[in-house]
Amino acid sequence: MKNTALSHIHEALGAKMVPFAGYKMPVQYEGVNIEHETVRNNLGIFDVSHMGEFLISGKNALALIQKVCSNDASKLIDGKAQYSYFPNETGGIVDDLIVYRLNEEKYLLVVNASNIEKDWNWINKHNTMGADLRNLSDDYALLAIQGSKAVEAMQSLTSVDLNSIPFYNFKVADFAGIEHTIISATGYTGSGGFEIYCKNSEVEQVWNKVMEAGAKFGIKPVGLAARDTLRLEMGYCLYGNDITEETSPLEAGLGWVTKFTKDFINSEALKKQKEEGLSQKLVAFEINERGIPRQGYDIIDNQGVKIGFVTSGTMSPSLNKGIGLGYVPINYSEPGSEIAIQIRKNAIPATVVKLPFYKK
């Protein structure tokens, strides 16, 4: 197991450490619900340094990104980020990612921790145009500072006006006494805030200064368990659960980042699937009685026949009810559709709802 540059700090804070994507990561400190509510109502800090970072540069950088990514990166300008995915050649998804445009010939791709090696091999395999590729994953750290008080709490740490960075935009600037950090108005929680990219050698200073500046705003460290409940309340896909090498991006609801205005890997097959119509869809549902849906549970109809499966599920700390995502046939995908979740021996009624579950 690898450590992040902050593992010793998490252990000193009493975090429960677990293996995740090849790293020893903090799953929780005080408890999932407390940490979840901290982000929703105040301010939390996550160490997500296990994520992967690839630098793509040179005159053919954009051409490579356009080939391997579903979204249209030609629409990006300096300082703007874009959600996207790598389609595979068989109708599924290699990974989902964020593309940052640093300048016309330099892009940063941020990928999931569990897929770093696979993604790196995938991009290199398709780099027929000779773009310059660098895997920075082992050298860079990533902190997510999330919550409604992030702007106010962090403003003293930078000369940049944090209010001036719109969602999915970023600045390369000073932060917590470190020059040339990336301050990105992105996150995986739905409660606003920033993600800070810096070198491993710098991240402990950044963490300490963030904790110091955030103290009067009630900042707390938050683990991966609350990160999962926060993202699920927003309906954000998790790779390995809701999207995989086998799932169609269109059925997963990623049509909005699938741009057929350009050619990309498997674009013709995906276009055909869109034209012919989908047979199933990833939907959000709420449990109508007591019960917690879990990944892998069967989704059934009112006759008790299996029609799908749960890909993500939890007890929502904000709504105090069971919520989940799962694939169902298209005729069960409209909000209001009645389904049931097989929880052990019981068929628990549930209703398909519109995302997000958590509305501010």
Image (cartoon, helix red, strand yellow):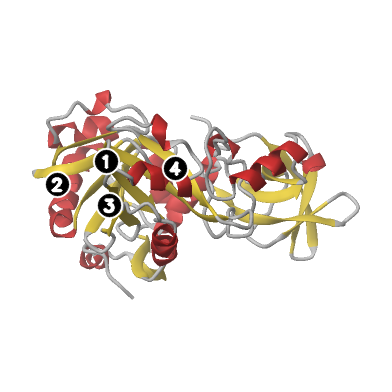
Q: Position of residue 57 (x, y in %)?
A: 27, 47
At 43% from the left and 62% from the top, the residue drawn is 125
At 31% from the left and 54% from the top, the residue drawn is 53
Report the residue marked by disc 2: 209
Q: Position of residue 193 (x, y in %)?
A: 32, 36
> What secondary structure is found at the residue carrying circle 4?
helix
Q: Position of residue 166 (x, y in %)?
A: 33, 27
Tag on residue 66? 4
Q: Which comes before the other along the chain, label 2 or label 1?
A: 1
Q: CA distance from mark 3 to mark 4?
A: 25 Å
- Please name which of the two marks, 3 or 4, marks the residue nearer to the observer: 4
Tag on residue 105? 1
Q: Residue furthest toward the top?
A: 164
How busy is the neighbourhood of tag 2: few (under 14 within 10 Å), some, or many (20 plus)?
some
Circles 1 and 4, Cβ within 8 Å, touching? The answer is no
How busy is the neighbourhood of tag 1: few (under 14 within 10 Å), some, or many (20 plus)?
some
Q: Check the image and report above or below for 147 versus 48.
A: above
Q: CA distance from mark 3 to mark 2?
A: 15 Å
Circles 3 and 2, Cβ within 8 Å, touching? The answer is no
Q: Which amino acid type corresponds to the residue marked 4 in the rendered image?
A: Gln
Q: Which comes before the other along the chain, label 1 or label 3?
A: 1
Q: Position of residue 234 (x, y in %)?
A: 52, 40
Q: CA distance from mark 2 to mark 1?
A: 33 Å
Is 135 on the left or on the right of 85, as rendered? left
Tag on residue 184? none
Report the residue marked by disc 3: 142
Q: Which amino acid type corresponds to the residue marked 1 in the rendered image?
A: Glu
Is 39 on the left or on the right of 216, as rendered? right
Q: Which amino acid type corresponds to the residue marked 2 in the rendered image?
A: Lys
- Please name which of the two marks, 2 or 4, marks the residue nearer to the observer: 4
Q: Which comes before the other along the chain, label 3 or label 2?
A: 3
Circles 1 and 3, Cβ within 8 Å, touching? The answer is no
